[in-house]
Image (spheres, helix red, strand yellow):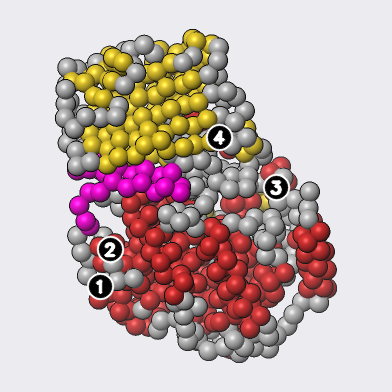
Amino acid sequence: MRSLQEIRYRLRQEAANLFLLLRAPAPNAVSKSPLELLPDPSQVAAGLKNSPFAAEVDSLATGILCNRIPLLGSEWCFDGPIPWRRDWKHNREFGGTPYFRLVPYLDFNRTGDHKFIWELNRHQYFVVLAQASLLSGRFDFLETLQTHWESWVAGNPFQRGINWTSALEVAFRALSWTWVYHLVGDRLPDSLRQRFLTELCRHGYHLEYNLSLYFSPNTHLLGEAVALHALGVLFPEFPRAGRWAKLGASIVEAELIRQVRSDGAHFEQSSYYHIYALDFFLFHYLLAGRPHQFEAVLIRMAEYLDAMQGPSRRIFFVGDDDGGRVFHPYGERTCFGRATLATCAVMFRRPEWLNDPDDLSAQAAWWLGASAFDVEPKPRPAADSKRFADSGTIVSESKNLFAVCKAGGFGPFRAGHTHSDSLSVSVRRADRDVLIDPGTFNYSDPEWRDWFRASAAHNTVRVDGLNQAATRGPFGWAGKPEVKIREWTSAPDWDYLDATCRYDRQPFTHRRRLLVRKDLGWLIILDSVTGPGEHCVEQFWNCAGPVSALSSHAYQLGDGARLLLDPTMQVETQDGWRSPVYGQKLPSQRIVASRRGALPVTFAAAVVGPGDDLQTLRVTSETQVSIGSAVFGFPPRTGLA
């Protein structure tokens, strides 16, 4: 049921949209380029001459000249005029440009997957062309940018068509155009500059009246508010600049409190969206004059990101990832957080967050100026395990093993970007991924959407084929489970976690006890499921690389580790999938251990070293597991028995 307040808001919103449709604003604003509140781009370009980043940008821009646009980890090739409303992945196109409220963008049969349309129309590759022109001085990059921009404006009239249906996408495009104007606005012809500013200002009007206050009050609302504020403060000549700056800032400040948990984690329970949100907050923080109330929260978010990346500085996927990025969405997706942490390293004087000086090039230098290159990285502190209490994230780090356990519940509201992954664990050993979350793949196909966010796609337990909650459309769950941490202890040689996941729809409780032997580089898991009657219990292990059987209950996982399973379980390998970036899925394998019988039931598993000559694991009591001749207690003792 909608509240009276929401109904009033939506009525005013629709009236404003119809007015804008019938009478598009045509301001006659003139703004300087480069923009005063952003760093001098010529100095940044001088600092990046002959750098690996300059070579990367030149390569990307050269491909664009040949009609190869980099999108979501691949290239989209086209002939002739750019089809701005085509889902290039599935070759579906929504013809015409009706009033944006009449576009059925969620109907795959009519529009395709709108994500692939919108990613192109974010125009982040425009920024690449502007950077390449600035770095090389080549006019053909700038000429191509102008041609593409003219084509877009002609094919996507204000308030009409699929590329106006999402306010967040309008925000992304507005930010891209802002960077283009900052980098090369002074090189554009005068007539084009005026039209460019008019169209950019119209994006601000659209954002003002289409903020996601009720539809998607998460990163959608955050990104829209950040863009609205940016337009207000960077272009004070726009007629409603003061209103936009004030409204955007008030929303971002409120969302900082609402969306960031006290432990620094973003409330979506998604590692990828955490990076996304942190970048939005950081950019706003800079443009807002670095308000003091933001600093402590942003530092906590950076500390969380640093912990989640571990010593190899690569993020584990937890929850949804949509393939996007606030700035420069190119390169290896698992390494996107490095540029974010490099920005934080400069901003908050924390050089230990800077892994490599090259990490400054993708974002920090453009946002903070050429002085960012003066920061020297410091060695990352010694391995340290952490518990993030509010999100339930457990990070166990030792010399040879890095593990992340999601011992927290689902996200807020309908938990749209959360997966059914409570108590799931991801493992990296000696910098090799061993057990993974397979990713997201897509949002539009119901079958694949449910496959990638199901419990079976995560390293956790399932009862009777049920997820931990019931799906409610592509972005919703009903009957979210109750997840609690009963105990967490970290000692020099071991970490110990005891946590439970109680199903809401069924009388089952999954208890997972996790022991990390730091001295051995081993992970040992003791699972128990309680409830009435007989049931089928399954334990899933989604593998990063090839799997080979050593015995009926021991498997070699590539060259990174061995997986030992409980001999009381039936074990099989299954074909699975992993998605390194939105829209791509690659074959993989998963191992499933199962048992049907009366509850309660207790069973174990262990990840050991690839060269450890071990193949036997047994549960010897409710609190002990043996591996070979060694016995491990739950809770642990300080040494081997």
Mark 3 sits on what residue?
Answer: 106
Please provide percent x and percent y for residue 447: 61, 33
Q: Specify the segment rendered in magenta.
A: 380-401
Alpha carbons under labels 4 and 1: distance apart = 45 Å
Give the amino acid type for the residue marked by disc 3 in the picture.
Leu
Indicate which disc, 3 or 2, sits on the residue closer to the N terminus.
3
Mark 4 sits on what residue?
Answer: 481
Report if the CB atoms under discs 1 and 2 are less than 8 Å apart: yes
Query: 579 above or below 144?
Result: above
Report if the CB atoms under discs 3 and 2 are less than 8 Å apart: no
Query: 535 above or below 55?
Result: above
Give the amino acid type for the residue marked by disc 4 in the picture.
Pro
Residue 396 among magenta residues: yes
Please provide percent x and percent y for residue 230: 55, 76
Please provide percent x and percent y for residue 451: 55, 32
Q: Nearer the viewer, mark 3 or mark 2?
A: 2
Q: Nearer the viewer, mark 4 or mark 2?
A: 4
Q: Nearer the viewer, mark 4 or mark 1?
A: 4
Mark 2 sits on what residue?
Answer: 354
Q: What element does badge 1 sit on?
A: loop
Going 28% across and 67% down the picture, which residue do you hit? 350
| Numbered label tally | 4
Splitting the image into 4 quarters, where does residue 475 fall?
A: top right
